[in-house]
Image (cartoon, rainbow, N blue to C red):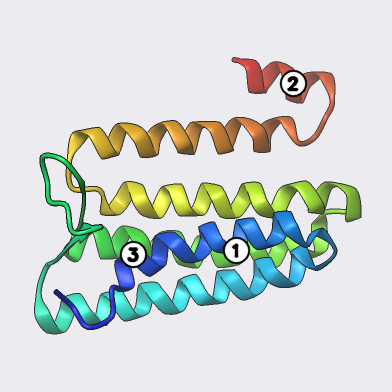
Amino acid sequence: MAAIPWGVMAILLPLAGAMACFLSPQRAKLLGLVTALGVVACVAGLGWQVAEQGAQRYAIGGWGAPLGIDLHSDGLSVLMLMVTSVVGLGISVYSSGYFKRDRAVNFWPLWLFLWSALNALFLSADIFNLYVTLELLGLAAVALVALAGGADALTGAMR
């Protein structure tokens, strides 16, 4: 077990950021940007850890593979996480100036929830957790599509 579970932090940090944005909507933009920088730092830490120590495996809650959640990070998953974190940071910076106040309040929790699901998808070690993360990813994506609020957005979200 690694000293700092960077993979777990890369999943929990955007989830905690989404909850903070939901609970404090007036600071959602600041919380979202700080969370985005934190996720990039976690992914960099995980990349360094995998480069130094090889593939990492995390048994969440102490329960292993057949009954619990296992996360696995290797070179490919770190590469996917790095691409996601760079693109996610770009999306976060762009979105901070794009959305007006009413849409931004709803955007930041959904965006960070989607980012957390993406990170969990790339770190999943079994098919069941892949399915669960794909479902979470789909829920967040549908909500983000419907965020525009127009008839076309709602039609697109329901497809």
SS class, disc 1: helix
Nearest to N terminus: mark 1 or mark 3? 3
Q: Residue furthest right?
A: 101
Please name the residue shown 25% across and 48% down the image.
Answer: 124
> Residue 151: which numbered mark, if any?
none
Disc 3 marks which residue? 8
SS class, disc 2: helix
112 sits to left or right of 119: right
Q: Specify few, some or many for label 2: CA neighbours under 10 Å numbering under 14, 14-19, or 20 or more.
A: some
Disc 1 marks which residue? 17
Nearest to N terminus: mark 2 or mark 1? 1
Nearest to N terminus: mark 2 or mark 3? 3
Type of amino acid at the residue the image marks with label 1: Gly
Q: Is residue 144 above or below residue 19?
A: above
How far is mark 1 from mark 3, CA to CA? Answer: 14 Å
Please name the residue shown 72% across and 30% down the image.
Answer: 146
Q: Residue 63: where, in percent of width, then height?
A: 16, 52
SS class, disc 3: helix
Disc 2 marks which residue? 154
Q: Residue 159: where, in percent of width, then height?
A: 59, 15
Specify whether residue 124 is in view: yes
Type of amino acid at the residue the image marks with label 3: Val
Quarter of the image with the N terminus in it: bottom left
